[in-house]
Image: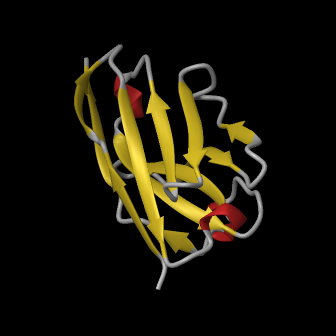
Amino acid sequence: QVQLVESGGGLVQAGGSLRLSCAASGLTFSNYAMGWFRQAPGKEREFVAVVNRVYSTIYADSVKGRFTISRDNAKNTVYLQVNSLKPEDTAVYYCAAASSTSTTKERFPYWGQGTQVTVSS
């Protein structure tokens, strides 16, 4: 079955950086758009970024210029480089896979378990 496993989260001071990774198995990785979403306590899960099969990317306005999504098809892995972190970036970050490019969480059938990112002020 499809498995997505995130890693790389942690506690970081405001202005710091992290690199989140998501290793995929059980699917033909290169055929899928890969996205990152996040969910803060008491809030809905929101779109962060997506990279499609031809490496085109889309970002949420709130992270443009600070976050970078990339993929390595040879390693079946998608990354999210998060820089200039702010306390409002604190959330559980999830990766997800979809058969077509989307920014809507309902269009992603496969999800990881999430990794916590906490940004202290």
The vertical placement of 29 against 22, above or below, is: below
Q: Where is residue 119 in the image (x, y as percent from the top left)?
A: 28, 28
Q: Position of residue 88 (x, y in %)?
A: 40, 29
Residue in the image at 29% along x and 47% along y: 116
Query: 60 and 79: which one is in front?
Result: 79
> Which residue, as the protein is rendered here, is positioned at the far bottom?
1
Q: Where is residue 22 in the image (x, y as percent from the top left)?
A: 43, 54
Q: How many marks?
A: 0
The vertical placement of 53 against 107, above or below, is: above
Q: In which quarter of the image is residue 20?
A: top left
Q: Identify the image quadrant of the C terminus.
A: top left
Q: In this view, does 12 lie to the left or right of 33?
A: left
Query: 30 and 32: which one is in front?
Result: 30
Residue in the image at 37% along x and 52% along y: 42
Q: In this view, does 24 lie to the left or right of 114?
A: right
Query: 80 and 114: which one is in front?
Result: 80
The vertical placement of 37 against 76, above or below, is: above
The vertical placement of 32 against 110, above or below, is: above
Residue in the image at 54% along x and 73% along y: 110
Q: In this view, does 120 lie to the left or right of 102?
A: left
Residue in the image at 47% along x and 65% along y: 24
Q: Where is residue 15 in the image (x, y as percent from the top left)?
A: 35, 13
- Colour scheme of the rendered structure: secondary structure
